[in-house]
Amino acid sequence: MGHMASTELAPLTPDKMVSGSTTHEQSILQLADFDEVVRLYRPRIFRFLMSSLSDRDVAESLTQDCFLKAYNARHQFRGESSLSTWLTRIALNLVRDHLRSRRIRFWQKTRETALDLVDISDWIPDTGVSPETSCLQQEKVKEVWRAVEELSRQQRTVFLLRFVEEMELAEIAETTGMNTSTVKSHLYRALRVVRDRVGGEK
Amino acid sequence: MSKMMDQMDQEIRDVSEPSLEPTGETAASIGLFRIAMHSIAERETARPVPSDWLIPARQRQRRAQRRVVLAWACAAALCVAVVPRATHHPHDVSHNGATAPPTAVAQTEESYTALLEQVDNEVSAPVPDSLAPLTELDSWNSNSSNLSTEKKNVIQ
């Protein structure tokens, strides 16, 4: 399970499967020690929720909700999917519910703890590059973040699962309940928006 | 517009998975974005999970459950209040004159008028002699007394 919160720039090849090394039996056994599950998967679930909702406090609350739901439903987990897929699916449902309720409570003040562009671009580890390069890197991160904010909810989910969580297309399909061609379609459109923003290649 | 979308869908069907991978500048930017997201998440979740970490989630869950129960209770109370009125409405009308419609009130007034007229007619109808009013009896008494005095006078 050495897939958690890797900060190295992983190549975007599809063989970087997070759950590939875990068998179903291992997942079920792992679920028995729930504290360990929380310790292992909390950063990943928090990261997905934070990037989906752009709000640290909401992401923390929903991470708690996600693990509570998982704990309550742990006997229903049959190991048909990996534990990370199962937890991400719960998190995704929580995102949907939260966005729906936020639309209803539109008058409520939100986003006070929202992750702004400065926050996110400041979090590139210092790798000893020159200040100019560091500035350029921060600008690139901001551009990607702006592009992600422009995406539709489904495009954003697929993009984040693919390029932040490094999930396979099939696993994204399983997590989101879409078929693979729909996932491809959303990913294609999301990439187009990001390419246009970043000003890269066609 | 739909033609464009169809064309785009066809393009997507035609593209192979590797073409869904960014390259060059885009790949580098997305990579930096991923690094930043991972760093923030690592920092935010670096503290060990306290034992009461899930308590707020439990409280939220209980509140949500209470809200659902309350909503169902309100709905049930509303049904109890509204449904019997709706089902018993015609029955109440037949027994309650105050809530009768205007046409029914008019019909009742007409029937009262007809009844009063009927009573008037019957009261004012000529009565047989045997049922003549008692006022005539006084006159008859006075007549008869006059006659008896005349008879007495004649005898005397």
Image (cartoon, rainbow, N blue to C red):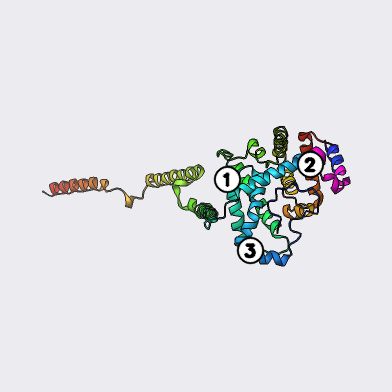
Callout 2: few (<14), some (14-19), or many (20+) C-alpha neighbours within 10 Å?
some
Examine the rendering and report whether any part of residue B62 can be seen: no
Q: Quadrant of residue B72?
A: bottom right
Q: Amino acid at mark 3?
A: Arg
Residue A77 x/y as whole percent = 67, 64
User: A125 or A58, which lies in front?
Assistant: A125
Circle 3 residue:
A74
Q: Position of residue B14 (x, y in %)?
A: 89, 46
Chain at tag 3: A
Q: CA distance from mark 3 to mark 1?
A: 25 Å
How far from the left and from the top, in percent, is residue B54?
A: 55, 56
**In this rendering, which labeled residue sits more in front, label 1 or label 2?**
2
Name the element at disc 2.
Answer: helix
Span shown in magenta: B10-25
Q: Position of residue A137 (x, y in %)?
A: 72, 36
Do the residues at pointers 3 and 2 share their chain? no
Which of the image's four quarters has the N terminus of chain B? top right
Q: Residues within 10 Å of mark 1 (few under 14, many from 20)?
A: some
Relative vertical location of residue B130 with respect to residue A28 in this rendering, above or below: above
Pick whichever, B97 or A156, lies toward us: A156
Q: Against A103, is A179 above or below?
A: below
Q: Residue at x 21, y 46 (%)?
A: B143
Give residue B32's mark. Answer: none
Magenta highlight on residue B24:
yes
Q: Which residue is mark 2?
A: B27
Q: Count of labels shown?
A: 3
- Using the rendered view, name the quadrant where residue B109 is placed: top left
Mark 3: which secondary structure?
helix
Contact, mark 3 vs mark 2 (Cβ under 8 Å): no
Image mark 2: chain = B
Q: In the image, what residue type sits under mark 2?
A: Ala
- Residue A57 is tagged as 1
